[in-house]
Image (spheres, rainbow, N blue to C red):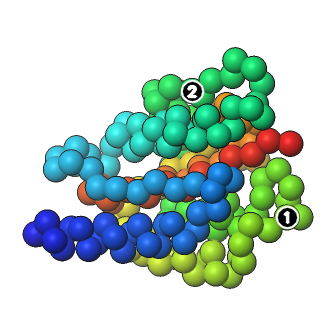
Amino acid sequence: MESRERAEKLSELGDLLTSLSNRPVVSVRYGRFPDGATPDHGLGPLAGHVHDLVAELHPIWERYIARGAVPPSASQIEARLEPLTADEAIELMTALASDDLVWPSSKLMDREIAHHTVTRLVTWLGSGATWWTNRQGNSWEPVSACTFDGVVAGSDGEYFAILIQLGED
């Protein structure tokens, strides 16, 4: 694939994902792994990008969180992520884009629009994509220093997409 075509694909992925962003509450990151970085869809590089996004957002949230609280390391984040099916990723990412974790009656964006966009995003990455979340049952394993956080991250081995919601009450 030519670099121009890759740039166009990355731009398309970015357009989909950024339309779900409501920063600083809902933030996104997307990109393309260097050639050969994740031939087996390994979680390590993807967890590293989740960590980088959390580190970028930490200064914004620092004044609201407990003094001295720091985000987990990339390896700690990797250990806290659980696999999802594509359908589960659609539902969970839709909820994170549209429903506030801290104030459930407060809506961040129209759920139908979020669902449509997330479905397009998951389809864009394809049926071979792997999906991960920090949700385990009815609880969330922390990936940030915030009281509330939820993340869905996916990759087709070449491109990746991350959506995270952070919050404090």
Q: Going 70% across and 17% down the picture, which residue do you hit? A: 68
Corner quadrant of residue 6: bottom left
**Rendered location of residue 80, percent (x, y):** 56, 35
Corner quadrant of residue 7: bottom left
- Give the number of the mark in front: 2 or 1: 1
Which kind of residue does numbered mark 2 sit on? Pro
Q: CA distance from mark 2 to mark 1?
A: 28 Å
**Rendered location of residue 129, percent (x, y):** 37, 61
Q: Residues within 10 Å of mark 2 (few under 14, many from 20)?
A: some
* Residue found at the very far top of the displayed protein: 68
> In the picture, which quadrant includes the C terminus?
top right
Could you tell me which secondary element the residue under label 1 belongs to? Answer: loop
Which kind of residue does numbered mark 1 sit on? Ser
Residue 163 visible in image:
yes
Q: Vertical placement of 7 versus 145: above or below?
A: below
Q: Residues within 10 Å of mark 1 (few under 14, many from 20)?
A: few
Most foreground residue, 31 or 47: 31
**Rendered location of residue 120, percent (x, y):** 47, 78
Q: Is residue 110 shown left or right of residue 144?
A: right
User: Which mark is on residue 106?
Assistant: 1
Q: Going 36% across and 74% down the picture, which residue do you hit? A: 12
> In the picture, which quadrant includes the N terminus?
bottom left
Residue on which disc 2 sits? 72
